[in-house]
Amino acid sequence: MPLGRDDVRKIAHLARLDLSDDELAVLGPQLDSIVGYVAQLSAVPTDGVEPLAHALPVRNVFREDEPHESLPVDAALGNAPALQKPFFRVPPVLEE
């Protein structure tokens, strides 16, 4: 089932992308192609294949943990949909 224009618009909204109609027309078929490819991969039989996190047997590939200068607050909050300076504003998730 191909993705419709409304589907692409909703995905763009979730990704916080403001796309023009021309961009939707170009990106829609590309996104539909990607989703189709993922569907092909889902059809590959993987019974008996052990899950793995890396294709090679590597251990401890993380860098040393060293302190660095923090990201400025304005840069960190730059793409937030709602702010209550200097914090992210999120809807409540717990009932009172």
Image (spheres, rainbow, N blue to C red):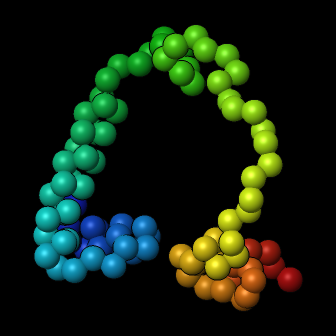
Side of 40 relative to 61 (left or right): left
Q: Residue 5 at x, y = what percent?
A: 20, 71
Q: How many marks on residues?
A: 0
Which quarter of the picture shows residue 12?
bottom left
Q: Residue furthest front?
A: 69
Is the residue 57 above or below the residue 83 in the image?
Answer: above
Side of 95 relative to 25 (left or right): right
Q: Residue 32 at x, y = what percent?
A: 21, 54
Nearer to the camera, 25 or 56: 56
Which quarter of the picture shows residue 62?
top right
Q: Residue 86 at x, y = what percent?
A: 75, 83
Residue 90 seen by the camera: no
Q: Residue furthest bottom?
A: 84
- In the image, what residue occupies the spot 19% across and 72% down? 23
Side of 69 relative to 32 (left or right): right
Side of 30 relative to 18 (left or right): left
Nearer to the camera, 89 or 61: 61
Nearer to the camera, 7 or 86: 86
Residue 34 seen by the camera: yes
- In the image, what residue occupies the spot 22% across and 80% down? 20
Is the residue 63 above or below the residue 88 in the image?
Answer: above
Q: Residue 46 at x, y = what percent?
A: 41, 19
- Quadrant (top left/top right/bottom left/bottom right) for the C terminus: bottom right
- In the image, what residue occupies the spot 13% across and 70% down? 25
